[in-house]
Amino acid sequence: MKNTTMLAMMILLIIAGGIFIISRGSTNSDGKNGETVAVIEGDAQKITLGTKNLNYYPNTIKVTEGKPVELTLDESVTGCLRSFTIKDLGVSKYARTPNEKIVFTPTKKGTFTFACSMGMGFGKLIVE
């Protein structure tokens, strides 16, 4: 093959790979704008948060009022984002490792902001 043909094929492969990576990065846990619904296992609603673009991901969570929530921060969560708070619900915990759970029971319906202790990372908890 000629050098120009090889170069053109390599450029096409790089572009195709970039499109694939970008499209995978935009896929959400349920396909809707970074929103997730808690998985119910036994009595607990289980949620795992990671990070994307230096923020919690997913950054919108739906849970059910009156049922315990077990929230885990995965290994991608670092720094002040490990200090998780929901001020309006009295939730505040520093999860040192991904094995530590942040456990709480939402007692009222509404939309509440969750954030790190410094307010750099944030999101919404929707209690239905």
Image (cartoon, helix red, strand yellow):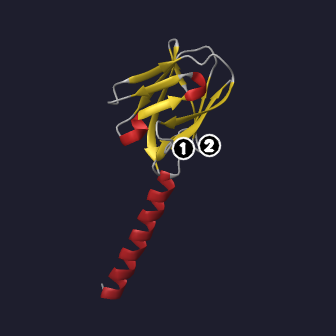
Residue 86 pos. (x, y %): 55, 29
Residue visible at 56% across and 28% down? 87
Count residues near mark 2 (Cα–Cα under 10 Å), then give few for <14, some for 14-19, many for 20+. Answer: few
Residue situated in front as seen by the camera: 10 or 121: 121
* Disc 2: which residue: 32
* Mark 2: amino acid: Lys
Q: Nearer the viewer, residue 86 or 105?
A: 86
Label 2, secondary structure: give it.
Answer: loop
Is residue 5 left or right of 36 when viewed as pictured? Answer: left
Q: Are marks 2 and 1 in contact (CB under 8 Å)?
A: yes
Query: Dot 1 lies on which element?
Result: loop
Where is residue 111? Give x, y as percent.
67, 31
Q: Report whether residue 100 is seen.
A: yes
User: Mark 1 — residue?
Assistant: 28
Mark 1 crowd level (few <14, some 14–19, many ≥20, 10 Å Cα): some
* Residue at far front of view: 118
Left or right of 122: which side holds 12?
A: left
Q: Position of residue 119 (x, y in %)?
A: 51, 41
Picture quarter with the N terminus: bottom left
The residue that appears at 37% across and 28% down in the rendered structure is: 95
- Gap between marks 2 and 1, in whole Å? 6 Å
Q: Residue at horizontal 33%, vertical 30%?
A: 96
Residue type pointed to by label 1:
Asn
